Image (cartoon, helix red, strand yellow):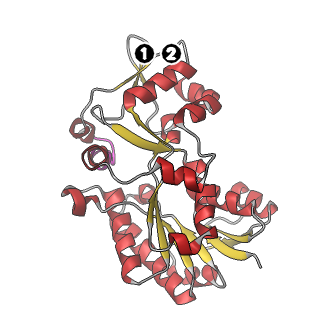
């Protein structure tokens, strides 16, 4: 009998990839949770066979009904939507309580490390998820934590390369020469599906997703290859200087890059490929997304 998996954030990048991967597998049924059941993305999922449920992590009364009868649940919270630490932590605790009460057999939570506890400096968008992980563990939930790396897709959006006066493009990622794990967020649905398929193997574990591990100059060289004659290069900015840039969340992101560089958090290309052998390298992704990259620059 097909197992019912409830997917939160089903119209977003992470949840959407998970929902799509599960819908391709007859061993699973998908209940897609969204705050707007009439959106185009929700209707597209419904057209592919997903059950659409309107619920919100901000409204605990909607969570129990959304989880009713679920074998598993995929949960992702979005700090960047409101940039409110207490709100995100409450969302995570509420869904943990609801999953416990509903008797869900496998929770897969998109978590991250508690940087303040590990490194001694704050990184709110990590720390919140770290606290949620700790709470889920304290409840003895049957849980697997999946920790995504920085996204390839960031190079089309928030971290798109900046054109310089000499016509070259700089990748403003302040890793100070260190390598960084990166992954296609949209590529990880099949990896999460493999975790749901093999519950006993993955329960109680944290899995760090990575499609590639590259220095920023290596990343720039790949972009130069695919987007020639444009030339890309790594920034010489430090993480501390990045943190002083003054836009909302700059200090948080600066500390994230510092954490990546100093503490090399556990992300595994090998484990990611074990779960999803077709996970793209950055080189493959850049080749496939040449047009989107080009449009982001123009």
* Mark nearer the N terminus (2 vs 1): 1
- The part of the chain drawn in magenta is 246-254
Relative to 144, does residue 99 appear above or below in the rendering? Answer: below
Question: Which dot marks residue 168?
Answer: 1
Contact (Cβ within 8 Å) of mark 2 with mark 1 = yes
Which residue matches tag 2?
230
Residue furthest out toward the left: 120
Question: Which dot marks residue 135?
Answer: none
Q: Name the side, left or right, on which 246 lies relative to 28.
A: left
Q: Position of residue 197 (x, y in %)?
A: 64, 69
The residue depicted at 21 percent of the width and 56 percent of the height is: 119
State the residue in front, 95 or 82.
Answer: 95
Q: Quadrant of residue 12?
A: bottom right
Q: Name the side, left or right, on which 67 lies relative to 220.
A: right
State the residue in front, 86 or 241.
Answer: 241
Q: What element carries label 2?
A: loop
């Amino acid at each position: 009998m097909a197992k019912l998996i409830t997917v939160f954030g089903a119209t977003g990048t992470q949840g959407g990839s998970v929902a799509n991967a599960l819908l391709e597998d007859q061993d699973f049924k998908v209940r897609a949770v969204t705050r707007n059941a009439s959106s185009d993305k929700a209707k597209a999922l419904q057209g592919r066979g997903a059950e659409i449920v309107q619920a919100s992590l901000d409204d605990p009364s909607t969570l129990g009904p959304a989880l009713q009868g679920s074998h598993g649940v995929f949960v992702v919270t979005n700090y960047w939507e409101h940039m409110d630490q207490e709100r995100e932590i409450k969302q995570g605790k509420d869904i943990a309580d609801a999953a416990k009460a509903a008797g869900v057999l496998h929770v897969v939570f998109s978590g991250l490390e508690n940087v303040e506890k590990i490194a001694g400096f704050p990184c709110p968008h990590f720390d919140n998820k770290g606290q949620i992980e700790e709470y889920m563990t304290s409840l003895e939930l049957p849980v697997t934590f999946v920790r995504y790396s920085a996204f390839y897709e960031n190079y089309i959006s928030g971290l798109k390369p900046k054109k310089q006066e000499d016509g070259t493009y700089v990748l403003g990622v302040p890793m100070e020469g260190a390598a960084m794990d990166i992954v296609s967020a949209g590529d990880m649905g099949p990896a999460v599906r493999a975790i749901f398929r093999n519950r006993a193997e993955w329960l109680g574990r944290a899995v760090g997703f990575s499609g590639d591990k590259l220095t920023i100059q290596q990343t720039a060289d790949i972009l130069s290859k695919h987007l020639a004659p444009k030339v890309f290069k790594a920034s010489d900015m430090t993480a501390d200087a990045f943190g002083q840039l003054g836009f909302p969340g700059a200090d948080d992101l600066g500390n994230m890059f510092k954490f990546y560089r100093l503490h090399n958090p556990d992300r595994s290309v090998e484990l990611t490929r074990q779960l999803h052998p077709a996970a793209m390298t950055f080189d493959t992704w850049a080749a496939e997304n040449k047009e989107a990259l080009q449009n982001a620059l123009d």
